[in-house]
Image (cartoon, rainbow, N blue to C red):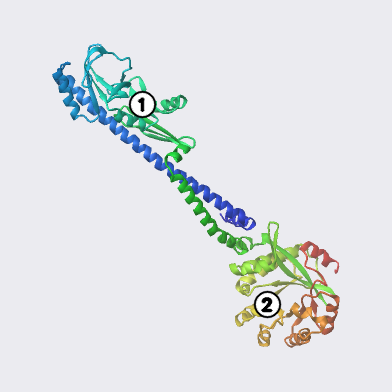
Amino acid sequence: MHKARYWLLLKIAERPKVFIYGAGILTAVSLALVAVIITAWLDKNQVAQRHGDAMRIFQAISAESSELLDHLTTHDKLDCSDEDLLHLNTHLLLARYIREIGLLDADRRLICSTALGRLAIPIKGDYPVHVSRTGLELLNGVPLTMADKMFAAVIIQRPPFNVVISPYATGGIYASADAAWLRTADGLALLSAAVDPETLAGMHERAGRLEHSDFELRGLGYELSTATPGLDMVLQTQRSLVTIARQNGMLLPALLAASLLITALAVGTIAPYVTKLRDLRNRIGFLCNEAHLSLVYQPVFDLKTLRPVGCEVLARMKEGKQLWMPDKMIPAILGAGLEYRLDHAVTRKAIRELAAYLPAWDGRFSVALNYFPESVRPDELIPVLTNALRAAGRPDLEICIEITEHSLSSQLISEVRRLKEQGFLIAVDDFGTGYSNLQSVTKLSPDLLKIDRSFIYELEDATVRSNLIPEIINIARAIDAQTVAEGIETAEQARLLAAAGVCYGQGYALARPMEVAQFAAFIAKFR
């Protein structure tokens, strides 16, 4: 989980625009998909509503037809007399879906009806009779003329009677679906279809296996099949995305437009947040360990002999191919409150690397380690130092703990004294910058005062600031400390400092910071 989070933060830092635009595209696609799903869901509900209404109408037609035909065949012994036809018409007044009643002879020929009266010649239609599983005998698509209009009518028979169903009712049923089927003892009989034969063949196969209503995604659309237990009708509708969009008017375009607007707002909201996530402090917790540390070592020289006497450890942080320098790394460390973790990691790695690479040294070789004030906790720092030195097995290594002058406080002074009692050297770094007073330095009683580079920079010009160097040397002598000059950039500066009484120095004029292997090779020349 931590690795995944770090990987994500790193990718955000490397390609923020890709992440912002990628998030925008993902948001747009997701919202567009949601818009399509909502539109399809609403469309499906509408289709399901139409199927349900059609099924209820078919159920009502079946019940009304069966009830009337049962009554006629059981109770009424009628013929084609005017009186009997008038009686049949009275039944029509009570019917909702039946528009005509007819009488059939033994050969199922129509001999009279409420609309046509007695026929001079009986009519025998050659239309197939579909018998449903419940016994309903149905003729479908029979051409009839009603009110001077030609209709494809549905006729339900129970000899010697038949009834003609309202074409508006059956038309509504057929219009509610792409395919309407009647369940018969021999399988499914097609009542209406609004799809091509190839599509219809697949729908017929699926409808034949259907026992209950079913919803199925098909490509960029869906198929809804409605079957109700006890009813012999099956309705099927297929909807493509294009059809859904077309038949739902402006719903989908409106939802897509809203999606684009929300995406634009989301990108505007995400952008500053992503910019904030790019900050190194969001990843520093993953980098603050020995694996990501890159240490360099700058030699410290005796200015009289120009022979190395130790080194200062300088930390950088590597992240892939990126090398973070202190000006970027330190603020992130401070912002995340990880000072002690960094200092402990630097301590362990520096002592281990020097123990492995540094040639045996005649005398003591001082290793200066910079510590944040928050890391100077003797109860935690002393075990880290002693364990690292014990593991190194190098008695010639001497640890010097550097504390910046501006961090001195009464509490820190007492903590540093405990470290000094354990045999570690103490140095005040950046001395002369004006953050402390002589009393604080005296209480600390450091072993070394490191003269800030700003004094050295102006040394050759004999400025007022550089003229303070002798005063710093006098302070060091007064507290029994030695001096180290930082930032020596020319040989003349080194000569003048030695002449003034500065003991040690470091800077580019003497040697640049080096990685451990190069540093060890450099030191070996002075053995």
Q: Is residue 347 visible?
A: no
**Depth order, front residue of 37/391:** 37
Quadrant in which residue 190 is drawn: top left
Residue at the location (36% across, 37% down)?
48
Q: Position of residue 463 (x, y in %)?
A: 79, 84
Q: Secondary structure at mark 1?
A: strand
Name the amino acid, label 2.
Thr
Side (left or right) of 214 relative to 454: left
Name the quarter where the C terminus is drawn.
bottom right
Q: Is residue 42 visible?
A: yes
- The residue indicated by pointer 2 is 404
Q: Position of residue 494 (x, y in %)?
A: 83, 78
Quadrant in which residue 409 is drawn: bottom right
Q: Secondary structure at mark 2?
A: strand
**Depth order, front residue of 505/37:** 37
Residue at the location (66% across, 65% down)?
345
Q: Give whichever of discs 1 and 2 has the lower sequence position.
A: 1
Q: Position of residue 120 (x, y in %)?
A: 23, 12
Q: Identify the disc placed on residue 181.
A: 1
